[in-house]
Image (cartoon, rainbow, N blue to C red):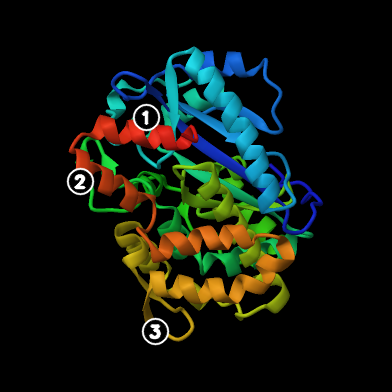
Amino acid sequence: MSLGVFAQSQPLTLGVELELQIVNSDDYDLAPVSADLLRLMEKRSIPGDVKPEITSSMIELSTGVCAGFGQVVSELGQIRDALVDCAETLDVMLCGGGTHPFQHWTRRRIFETPRFHELSSLYGYLSKQFTVFGQHVHIGCPSADEALVLLHGMSRFIPHLIALAASSPFVQGEDTGFDSARLNSVFAFPLSGRAPFVQTWSDFEVFFNKMTRTGVVSGMKDFYWDIRPKPEFGTIEVRVLDTPLTIEKAASLAGFIQCLGQWLTREKPFKLSEDDYLPYTFNRFQACRFGLDGTFVDPETGEHRVLRDDLSRVLSRLDSHAGDLHAEGALQYLRREINGLGNDAAWLRQVEDEQHLLPEMVRRAAMRWHGR
C-alpha cells in the first residue's frame, strides 16, 4: 500500500480529538450507550464531529481545522454543550480522565464496526483493556519533510506533555502510583513507541514500504507511535496526552503544542540527532510515573532536571510565540497548574483523599467536564 501524497495544510493549524468516558448518573460506572448517544448527536449541528471508539462506553469528539487556541476553545465548547445535552437525555454523563478509576475491562463491549472487530480478533483482551481515553492534537505542516523534522523536534518534549496532561492515576479501583497509567495500556501494543529517525519523506516511504511488505502493517493507523505523521491531513499527530478533565485544559495543551511548533520551526533551537532518543524511554517513564515531579534527562547535555522546572523554562521561551499566536491564555492556564496543585492526576488524588469514594470522584470529574 502506498502512503500517497502528503496533503497541503496551513502551517501550525490545529485539530483536537478527545476520547471521553460515558458514565451512569447513579453509580458512575461506564455506560455502554455510545450508539444511542451518536444517534442523538446526528440531529445536532456542531463545528466538528463525533464518532464511536473501540468499546461502547467511549466516544470521540473532534474539532475542525482551527487557526489557534481561541478557536479550539470555541469549538470544543460547542461540541461539549451538544454532547452534554444529549447525554442528559439518556440519563448519563460525560467525563474526562485517561482511565475510568474502577471499571472492569471484562465487562466492556466492542463497538459494532468491522475495523473494531478486526482489532479485537488481532489483539484479544488488549482490545477491551484499551478502554482508555486520550487527547490527540494535529498540527499542520507545509510539507512532508518539514513534518518529519517537526515530529523529531517535538519528540524531545514528549515527557513534558505526558506530565502536563496526566489524568489516569487509578485503574480497577486501585491507585497505580502512576500519574498516567493509561499509557501503560498503549505501550502494550507492538507498534507503539517512537517513530523511526528519518528526516525526509522519501526515506520514510522506504521504511513504510518495508513494513507493509512484511504484512505487519497496512496503513498509518497501524502505528501507535507517540507522534505519527498523518499524510492525508498534512499534519503530525501528538498522541501521548491523557484526556483532560476540562475543555479549557484540552485547549491549553493544544495551544502549548502550537507554540512549541512555531518555536521549533522558526528558531530551530536544537540540532536533530538519533542520539536525542537515547534517554527517550527513561524520560517517558519518569513522566508517566511521577508526572511533573519526574526527572528529565536533557538529551544534549545529559543534565538531569525536574520536569516541573524544565517546563517553566520552556514556557518562558514560548511567551513571544504565544503573543504571535494569541495563545497567552493557554500558557497562563498551564503555569497556574504547574505553580499550584499540579496536573489532573493530582486533582483526582486530592478528591479521593478527601472522599475515600471513587464513584464520588467520578461524579465530581464529570461535573467539571460538564462545565459546572
Q: Amino acid at mark 2?
A: Asp
Image x and y of residue 143, in percent: 78, 60
Q: Describe the element under mark 1 as helix, strand or loop.
A: helix
Image spot of residue 348 (x, y percent): 31, 45
Proximity of marks 1 and 3: CB atoms separated by less than 8 Å: no
Mark positioned earlier in the residue sequence (3 or 2): 3
Q: What's under tag 1, amino acid-wise?
A: Lys
Disc with the residue nearer the chain's start (1 vs 3):
1
Quarter assignment of residue 152: bottom right
Quarter of the image with the N terminus is top right
Q: CA distance from mark 1 to mark 3?
A: 40 Å
Which residue is identified by label 2? 353
In the picture shown, does residue 295 fall above or below 243?
A: below
Residue 331 placement (x, y as % from top left): 56, 63
Q: Which residue is mark 3?
A: 303
The structure residue drawn at horizontal position 32% and vertical position 53%, both measured from the top left corner, is: 346
Amino acid carrying label 3: it is Glu
Foreground: 136 or 278? 136
Circle 2 Cα neighbour tier, 10 Å, few/some/many (<14 / 14–19 / ≥20): few
Number of other residues with Cα within 10 Å of mark 1, as a class: few under 14, some 14 to 19, many 20 or more: some
